Amino acid sequence: MKKIKYLFKRIKGMNFSNMFDTAKEVSKETGKNRFLVLFDIIHCGYKYMAGFVDYKVFKMYNLNEEQRATYITRGVNNNYVKLLNDPEAMKKVDNKLEFNKNYNEFVKRDWICLTEVSFEEFETFFKKHKSIIVKPVDEMCGKGVDKITLDENTNIKQIYDDLLKNNQILIEECVKQNSKIASLNPSSVNTLRVVTLKKENEVKVLFTALRIGNGKSVDNFNNGGMFTVVNENGVITKPAISKDGTIYDVHPLTHEKIVGFKLPNFEIALDTAKKCAAKIENVRYIGFDVVITEDSALILEANPFPGHDLYQSVAHLDKDMKGLKPKFDAEIFGK
């Protein structure tokens, strides 16, 4: 029944043009008949609750039925969220301002909200920190996040007015990341994604990945960045991959080696995410973006609807090409 409800919901809001384009692309890549590919996309949507983006990103056209059943697809991830997270409680975590207010002990940086301070207070904050990060409170994937640096030509009042107009009302001091991690890409803070599950007052880590910027001020996978998985010892054993599927063993701008990189303070970062997760009520499944600093770690933000697109990249799977659903199900359902 869940699959049928999900399928009808997806059909109602589906972008059919993009779905047909996906079928066309896969047909061109594989040599398979376009209509057979389209039928297979629909089949995966019904049987595995996979969207056409899942079908393309996870290359489900190259997988057999046994392999496909192991993937955390869009629908599977939605069900995890529905089961584990209360919708009202999610709002307090998802909203960046609310998160900063409620879990400031893990934020560990100065911040203000433009709608709660005067222009003079903003000016004082800006002059104190020189460089600031400005954010909307309810956007995702790094959208609307900018870095602004003060110099002799800066019109602070104009910036203040523009930020209010653009709803970039959360203002934070710039975080200084660990120098070793900065060496991978210094233009952005390169964050550790830590996905946690709280079950019976115990917090477990389900997944860890390092997001790395690529010349921009943000590291988001959906905004020009790349990512790679991190093993239980804090070591990167697989190459990074970008949204367009480009594989990187070495960072293209800094020429730093990615594979074999060991994250400093990795256990501290995991512990920080787990402690924060333990304090959040009624949201049991969370993706934390953790900044590893020189001698500690802090939470940049928390995502009560963790993006499943990071979980099963073709660049990071074992030879059997199986996904992470069995692992997640074992922890969530005790299977």
Image (tube, rainbow, N blue to C red):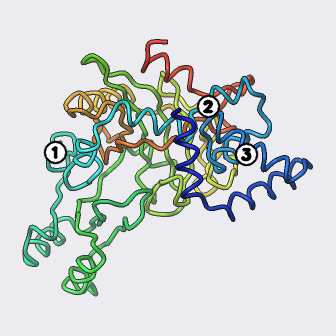
Q: Residues within 10 Å of mark 3 (few under 14, many from 20)?
A: many
Residue marked by disc 1: 104
For the residue marked with disc 2, what is the amino acid? Tyr
Give the label, 1 or 3, closer to the camera: 3
Relative horizontal placement of residue 277, taking residue 229 as reference (left or right) = left
Disc 1 element: helix
Query: Which numbered disc covers residue 246?
Result: none
Is residue 214 rendered to the left or right of residue 189? right
Q: Residues within 10 Å of mark 2 (few under 14, many from 20)?
A: many
Q: Earlier in the sequence, mark 1 or mark 3?
A: 3
Which of the numbered marks, if any, corresponds to residue 71? 2
Q: Position of residue 233 (x, y in %)?
A: 48, 22
Judge by depth and name the residue closer to the eye, 166 or 106: 166
Q: Which mark is residue 41?
A: 3
Q: Is residue 94 above or below residue 172?
A: above
Residue type marked 1? Asn
Q: Is the residue under label 3 in contact with that under label 1 (CB below 8 Å)? A: no
Left or right for 162, reference 81: left
Position in image of residue 217 (x %, y %): 44, 62
- Residue 167 placement: quadrant: bottom left
The residue nearer to you, when weighing 306 against 189, is: 306
Residue 137 image-quadrant placement? bottom left
Residue type indicated by callout 3 = Ile
Q: Secondary structure at mark 3?
A: helix
In this view, the residue farthest toward the top is 335
> Marks 1 and 2: which is nearer the front?
2
Examine the rendered structure and indicate whether residue 13 appears above or below residue 239. below
Sooner in the amino-acid sequence: mark 3 or mark 2: 3
